[in-house]
Image (cartoon, rainbow, N blue to C red):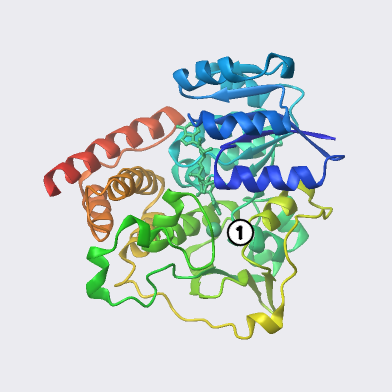
Amino acid sequence: MQNMVILGATGSIGASTLSVISQNPAEYCVHALVAHSNVEKMLPLCVEHQPKFVHMVDEKAAAELKAKLPQSLNIQVSTSELDLIGLVSAPDVDTVMAAIVGAAGLMPTLAAVKAGKRVLLANKEALVMSGQLFMQAAKDSGSILMPVDSEHNAIFQSMPLAVQENLGHCDLSENGVSHILLTGSGGPFLTSDLSTLATMTPAQACNHPNWSMGPKISVDSATMMNKGLEYIEARWLFNTKPSQLKVVIHPQSVIHSMVQYDDGSVLAQMGNPDMRTPIAHCMAYPQRIRAGVEPLDFFKVGQLSFCEPDYQRFPCLALAIDACNVGQEATTVLNASNEVAVEAFLNEQIRFTQIASINEAVLKQVPQQSLSSIEDILALDVDARRYAQEAINKNK
Ligand code: NAD
Ligand code: MG
């Protein structure tokens, strides 16, 4: 029986994780649920899954939840940051699903890594901000990191055992791997007229053709910043050199990514676009469990197609790849700026196309500082957010 903590329990990945746990009740137990402030969503999750602990980051929400929870469930409610770190690090916790969205996920996820837990990593922003430190912390503590992001999970499944067992620290070429082919659907605006992008609304940007996800990652998919963040995520998870990582547009989202070998072989992982597949894989690896996902029907799929990314249409993708090549400072700045810009777009304060221009301006403006600790990273994140907010205010 694995005791699990779900960070981001009220979100899209949280829901998919709880669905996989419900289908495998003999193997997995919900130890704790963590979310920001949505009491309406958290309350029924507590009643259904009966965790020992529930943590709400927002104090008011924690108090409200405490008042509404039936006493008979005997669930402890907490809210301080210290409590959260204690919760993920507790000795009776085996596995932590890291599915808080954005930079807010970094500290609790890193705490789970440092405590040597099995960490199922959905929160890609943690790696974008602190890849080197994060991967080193996992190596030092012996924490097993499993990539939940569907592309990285597909790459993991297609890698040789030696790479899987030494994630982030293996030399790909020594293991016969020539390239990682990171696939992306291109999102809802892949074929839209370029002149219409400036007037796209949050609802249009969140209307992904294949995947149902939270609002931030949906907007990131529309700008293809998501693929850019995933490029950086892959760089750390698989220890890639720039020449080993390519982005391929694949609109059907049936192939979730591929690994190309020196002998000409290409291994791909396929499936319906349903996050319960990579989540179940991460939970059970090296075993397999039921995820409740429909089997892929190739006759319904019909055709698979591929094309090169268009960087004029998707400037955020180019910014992220460039930042990855510059280094950790640039990716931390880009991640922070993008979070602020996406939030402003979702609140209808800026246009869709301004997300890229704000990110570009912030990358140019924020002084590069060397990052040797998590405190340095968090300070740079704060600086970049301030610059992004200023750029938004100027653009209003
Ligand atoms: P979501 O918006 O649906 O849910 C986000 C969760 O994070 C919620 O439970 C919310 O309460 C919590 N949260 C937000 N701010 C918080 C804070 N300050 N402190 C603590 N908790 C906070 O997001 P999602 O789509 O489930 O995505 C979660 C993460 O997984 C993201 O990093 C995303 O990039 C990654 N991911 C998602 C998908 C997907 O299909 N949804 C796929 C791959 C990766
Ligand atoms: Mg993905």
Q: Is residue 344 above or below residue 192?
A: above
Position of 16 compared to 103: left or right? right
Q: x%, y% of residue 275?
A: 63, 56
Q: x%, y% of residue 27?
A: 85, 40
Q: Is residue 34 above or below residue 232?
A: above
Q: Residue at x 51, y 18 (%)?
A: 64
Tell me if I can see residue 17 in this picture.
yes
Q: Residue at x 59, y 52 (%)?
A: 237
Q: Secondary structure at mark 1?
A: helix
Position of 96 compared to 125: left or right? right
Amino acid type for the residue under numbered disc 1: Ser
Quarter of the image with the N terminus in it: top right
Q: Nearer the viewer, residue 315 or 2?
A: 2
The residue tagged 1 is: 150
- The CB of the residue at mark 1 lies under 8 Å from ligand 2: yes
Quarter assignment of residue 186:
bottom left
